[in-house]
Structure formats: structure tokens, C-alpha cells
Amino acid sequence: MPKNPALRLNVMSEALLSRNRKISQQHGKYWRAGVTVLVLAASAIMFTSFLWGYGNIPVVNLQYQISQAQETKKELLEMNRKLRIEMSSLTAISRLERLAIETYGMGPPQSGHVIYVP
């Protein structure tokens, strides 16, 4: 071994590198093909996932529109129910009679006011 520290480090690094080269070059003969197959399989899975996601965008949009339409339907049905209750209270006979007597001064018809049509 050389006495100079820089040369000694150089010799040691070459020795380590040569050992590492031997280890890294000891792959099986099908190693490169296996890595290629794995990369292609991963790429195919990613591509398929992107296509599936892109194809589902219209479905998600339609589901969103359906849920909005259902909420609108629910609101309109509730408004319809309230309006029916209000209409039935406004057209109640007892209310109309009280309104006619109190507001318009009307009363039951007298015998001369009734005309019978044959």
C-alpha cells in the first residue's frame, strides 16, 4: 500500500468500486426483461386508471345534476303542500261567511232577493 494518504484512498476506492461492479453485474440473464415487463405492466395499469377516471367524469356530472333536481323537487313539493293548506284555509266556508258579514256588511238573503230560475 502506498504511504501517501491520497493515493491510499484512491487505491481503496478503486478496490471498493471493483467489488461493487462485480456485485452489480451479477444479475440473472432475465433480469432486464423482468424489469421491462414490470415497467410496462405499471404503465398499462396507470393508463387504464386514467381512462377509467376520464370516462367517469360525465357519470359524476349526471349524478350531481340528478341530486340537484331531487332537491328542487323536494322544495317544490313542500311549497305545493303549504300552498294547498293556505288555499284550503282561504276558501273555508266559515271564513268566507265571517268576511262577508264583517267586511262587506252582507247577510243572509231575504225572500225578495232570491230568484228561482226554471
Image (cartoon, grey):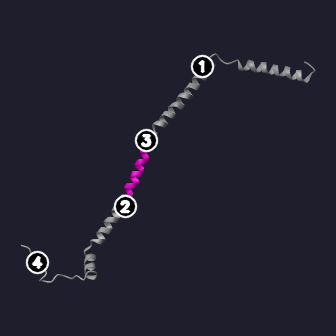
Question: Residue sitting at 70 percent across and 18 percent down?
Answer: 26
Dot label at residue 33: 1
Q: Residue furthest left?
A: 118
Point out the image quarter for the C terminus: bottom left
Q: Which contiguous range is marked in magenta?
A: 60-74
- Neighbour tally class for label 3: few under 14, some 14-19, many 20 plus, Cα within 10 Å: few
Tell which circle, 4 or 2, labels the residue nearer the N-terminal end. Answer: 2
Q: Main secondary structure of the magenta part?
A: helix
Disc 1 vs disc 3: which is toward the camera? 3
Residue 74: give x, y in percent of width and height. Answer: 38, 57
Instruction: Kindly give the residue lying farthest to the front in the view shown.
Output: 104
Q: Secondary structure at mark 1?
A: helix
Badge nearest the viewer, 4 or 2: 4
Quick one: label 1 or label 4, which is nearer the N terminus?
A: 1
Amino acid tagged 3: Val
The amino acid type found where label 2 is placed reads: Glu
| Front of the two marks 1 and 4 | 4
What is the C-alpha distance between the residues marked 3 and 2?
Answer: 29 Å
Q: Earlier in the sequence, mark 1 or mark 2?
A: 1
SS at circle 2: helix
**Horizontal side of residue 106 vs 36, given as left or right:** left
Mark 4 lies on a secondary structure that is loop
Examine the structure image and report whether residue 69 is included in the region drawn in magenta: yes
Crowdedness near tag 4: few (<14), some (14–19) or many (≥20) residues, C-alpha within 10 Å:
few
Name the residue that disc number 4 marks.
115
Which residue does the numbered mark 2 point to in the structure image?
78
Vertical order, 96 against 77 (above or below)? below
Q: Amino acid at mark 1?
A: Ala
Residue position marked by numbered label 3 in the rendering = 59
Q: Is residue 73 magenta?
A: yes
